[in-house]
Amino acid sequence: MTTKRKGRYGNHGGQYIPEILMNAVLEVEAAYEQYKKDPAFIAELEDLQVHYTGRPSLLYYAKHMSEDLGGAKIYLKREDLNHTGSHKINNVLGQVLLAQRMGKKRIIAETGAGQHGVAAATAAALLGMECEIFMGKEDTERQALNVYRMELLGAKVHPVTSGTMTLKDAVSETLREWTRRVDDTYYAMGSAVGPHPFPMIVRDFQSIISKETRAQILKAEGKLPSMVMACVGGGSNAIGMFHHFIPDEGVQLVGCEAAGLGIETKEHAATLAKGTPGIFHGMRSYFVQNEYGQIAPVYSISAGLDYPGIGPEHSYLHDTGRATYVPITDEEAVTAFEYLSRTEGIIPAIESAHAVAQAMKVAPTMGRDESIIICLSGRGDKDVAAMAKYRGREIHE
Amino acid sequence: MSKLAYTDNFDIQAAFAKGKAFIGFLTAGDPNLEATARYIQTMAQAGADLIEIGIPFSDPVAEGEVIQRASERALAKGALTDAIFDMVAQVRETVTIPLVFMTYLNPVYVYGTDRFFKRCKALQIRGIIVPDLPYEEKEELETVAATYGVTVISLIAPTSEQRIGRIAKEAKGFIYCVSSLGVTGVRKNITTDIESLVGTIKKYTDIPVAIGFGIAEPEQAKAMAAVSDGAIVGSAIVKIIEAYGDKAETPLAEYVKSMKNAVSQA
């Protein structure tokens, strides 16, 4: 097996897609290579990041949480404060701007929790492009508010009824839609998954998270953190959080996967804990699947982490041991969701709460001179009704 | 099993040796593997020159709703790769036309590429169509397949453009020419300029070119075969099986006969 081809992370990655899409993907790759070095493109993106998204996002010292847990100091990278309420805007502004430069008229995208869909619809509204979002039917029900948000922003939302009706099927259906209409259409992939160049493009646009964080923590603490952590579904906020810390060998990189009802059950989405190597959705990576290569239905309380695969670069970081991936159950995540709300007055997205939960486990075992940075990838407003329901209270959104 | 000695009949070329080819697809295990075995025989007797046996995949990104549903039905019935191989072994005792597998990369890769093609060789399966394997990534699969005498069929689409020459020059067996954009499924009209697409392909290769995606009616098959070396039909066959379930022999035989007849007149 060759490992030095383009778009490879060790043996992972690649471009395993239908012939109909191959030229489109090569076209995106060529355009990205051109525009990422183009001063006018970079300037326009930076201007949007500052004046539209509200970057740089804060690095917040969670004093109460740190004191309550004892041990390491905990910092939160506040991606939840971005316009649209999550890290997803970092990626879509870059990709929709790229699509516009390529002369495309229409953006299509998949979404799980709806955060990427909302961000894509927002960027399309801002930059004057058509937008259609594919979302698993089950997720449209779990995240009804986000569906309405997307519609408000002018996007058309297609509920996906194939397969398990969740994020995986939304990706498949968006790929199918791209094969139907490829000429004027750009697929804005929402996570660091899919065929090359998407995992690279998404990582590059999300790496602003670690670029800012690294400078912010050096200013605050005068040294690098012991650990950075982020939740992982496809892995876009995590790869963005890890990227500029990868060369810093003393910094542990921790990805928090959705363990659902527990990795000893079948109701989880913990790809690196329970998955095996495979080739799906355009990439070679790890997948939750059976011995015949049939992709397994996965489960998590968090629609954004409910995906049976993971980005190829995470698989590589897992193989090499540079990053560690841990499973976090629904119960642990919900407890962390409530804990952060009470201790710091910050309601995190249930996705991000998976990372908060891991910090709650390890911080007490670490020294007071150490620090942990959690990527707070999104805000939790969208999850409030579901969390109430989890605790046995029905509220109408 | 002495029939397996006459290997030439099983070569992909045999499908195109007697004029324009009619190629049929069905999903293994839909509605069950026993029925699939019967339907392969039915289609071969009704005049199909080559049959593509679909190994179902949970998430077939290149398929339309008809084949998606067939894959779901087959997997729900437990049509797993080993059981499909066993079914083909049984079919091979009577069916002597070329058979190829059509499936996605993951079922092959996870089964073990070497182990998969070894089984293909034993079953006289000489070709495989993998819709999520483009030219740029084909080498690793092709190398192993070739060791066992299995040809990886190349696909060319209306969007292939400047890559047509590269793909066609290295293609073996036959070229699967995709008639239209989109996923598999029946279409009323095929609007691509197929004649010009096939003409471009033929500049680079002498191997047969067969057209698939969207063909359902005899007139369409005839028109497609007229400008190429054959017509491939999947969703229309799967729809018949979906409608008649376990008892699809008669309508299937009639359909394949009418399609083969139309292709022969092209």
Image (cartoon, rainbow, N blue to C red):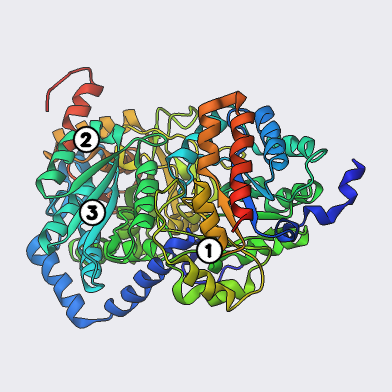
Tell whether label 3 touches label 1 (CB within 8 Å): no
Q: Nearer the viewer, residue A241 or A221?
A: A241
The local secondary structure at tag 2 comes to: loop
Say whether residue A1 is visible.
no
Element under disc 1: loop
- Which residue is at 41% across, 71% downward? A26
Residue lying furthest right: B2
Horizontal side, residue B26 vs residue A60: left or right: right
Q: Respond whether the residues carrying marks 2 and 3 are from the same subunit.
A: yes
Residue B186 at x, y percent in the picture: 44, 45
Mark 1 or 3, closer to the camera:
1
* Residue highlighted by disc 3: A88
Confirm or deny contact between disc 2 and disc 1 (CB under 8 A).
Answer: no
Mark 2 / mark 3, whichever is N-terminal: 3
Q: Position of residue A148 (x, y in %)?
A: 13, 39
Q: Amino acid at mark 2?
A: Gln
Label 2 packing within 10 angstroms: few (<14), some (14-19), many (20+): many
Which residue matches tag 2?
Answer: A143
Q: Which quarter of the picture shows residue A298?
A: top left
Q: Is residue B162 left or right of residue A173?
A: right
Q: Residue at x 66, y 39 (%)?
A: B81
Subunit ID for the residue under disc 3: A
**Chain for numbered disc 1:** B
Q: Amino acid at mark 1?
A: Pro
- Tell me the kind of residue under disc 3: Lys
User: Dot 3: what SS?
Assistant: helix
Q: Which mark is residue B134?
A: 1
Residue drawn at x 38%, y 67% as measured from the top left: A24
In this rendering, the count of numbered labels is 3
Residue reaching furthest front?
Answer: B265
Compared with residue B119, is residue B204 higher up or lower down, i.e. above or below? below
Task: Report the side of A157 relative to A50 (left or right).
Answer: right
